[in-house]
Amino acid sequence: MPDTRLTDEQEALRRTVAAFARAVAAPAAARHDEERTFPYEIVAGMGKMGLFGLPFPVEYGGMGGDFFALCLAIEELARVDSSVAITLEAGCSLGAMPVYRFGTVEQKREWLPRLCTGEALGAFGLTEPEAGSDAGGIRTTAVRDGDEWVINGSKAFITNSGTDITRLVTVTAVTGTTGDGAKEISTFLVPVPRPGFTAEPAYSKVGWHASDTHPLTLRDVRVPAANLLGERGRGYANFLSILDEGRIAIAALAVGLAQACVDESVAYARARQAFGRPIGANQGIAFKIAEMEARTHVARTAYYDAAARMAAGLPFKKEAAIAKLFSSEAAVTNAREATQIHGGYGFMNEYPVARHWRDSKILEIGEGTSEVQKMLIARHLGL
């Protein structure tokens, strides 16, 4: 078992990000949520702190840390604003990580320095209107035309894809068929803005209101042949490996939200008076909050284990699925319980728990649904 205790350096990072989250992100969270505006000023602050470069080498403009460090930062940001946390998560693990994992030296040198500073955002174009986990459903195509690839198709639910600082969308596309007749799927770096590339109007979402999410249309989008990312025909397999890592980051985000619900509930239970005493003095409330804290602790332990395994170079796919499954469901449960503890106030958007409640549900869906996680775990058990 890897050691999951935080080092002094990791603890210092956690405290630094927590202080930034409380001082900068928290005061603006309700406004951005209500106005559904992208938090450019907060993203710029995270960029100056080096958060977008946490898991990348110094030679490419990163901070020389690892994925565990990124997860610690995501958790602390999610304790105040999930929209900010998912912006960082998607920018790093989905936007920049494919370039780092599978790109050529030239591609890394071209893209990573800007992505690591947060001055540019990258997005991950996998999901389509009729294709998510089902690779066979991908309809976007890329056809070789001389020294270029011509891409046509559409993508759905793409985070960070339509901001003023979005500069790269990595797109999966069908480039032919394999020997057994299956679709050959490859991956391409699409710089944006680009002729033929359109970020359609943003979705009206239940939660994550300050996170940027669009459907995308690609009509005869031309990119140089050199923009093929990784080996031709390995696009889907490569993205699946990226999702394995990303599930740990989503688990960290879920833990942050779950902890926020505990924190808000404790504060409210101490302050709210009913029948002459704080409602936290009642076992019905106290036990509910105790269960929320226990749930959060177990979820954090699960993602720490998966992150430590990954950092140590150990197999982590099953542990990542477990962490993502348990943490996302813990976040949803804690958000529901926190809303209940707040009573009528919990249904009012002026209280953070209402936002946490709206933000939590997507955690059981994005980067692999709970059902997909159970399928992965079952496979590792030989079922």
Image (cartoon, helix red, strand yellow):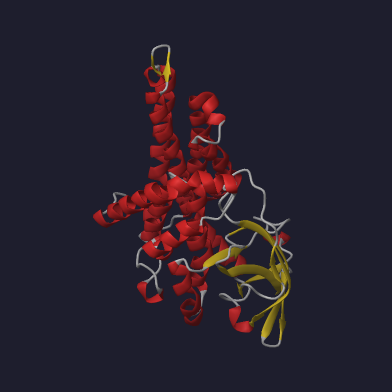
- Residue drawn at point x = 48 percent, y = 42 percent: 327
Residue 207, image x and y in percent? 59, 44
Q: Residue 6, how many percent across, how many down?
A: 29, 51
Residue drawn at x 63%, y 68% is: 171
Residue 19 coordinates in the image, percent (x, y): 34, 49
From the viewer's side, name the closer residue of 33 and 102. 33
Q: Please indicate, yes or no, whether residue 178 appears anywhere in the rendered image.
A: no
Task: Report the side of 232 relative to 96 (left or right).
Answer: right
Residue at the image point whose x is 57% and y is 40% from the top? 358
Question: In the picture provided, is 152 more to the left or to the right than 23?
Answer: right
* Residue 168 place in picture, x, y as percent: 57, 70
Q: Nearer the viewer, residue 180 or 164?
A: 164
Give the residue drawn at x 47%, y 72%: 114
Residue 143 visible at all: yes
| Up-down relation of residue 105 to residue 274 (above or below) | below
Outermost residue toward the bottom in this view: 146
* The quadrant where residue 53 appears: bottom left
What is the quadrant of residue 129 in the picture? bottom right
Please tell me whether residue 219 is drawn above or below residue 7 in the rendered image. Answer: below
**Please, is residue 263 above or below residue 168 in the view?**
above
Give 32 or 133, whichever is nearer the viewer: 32
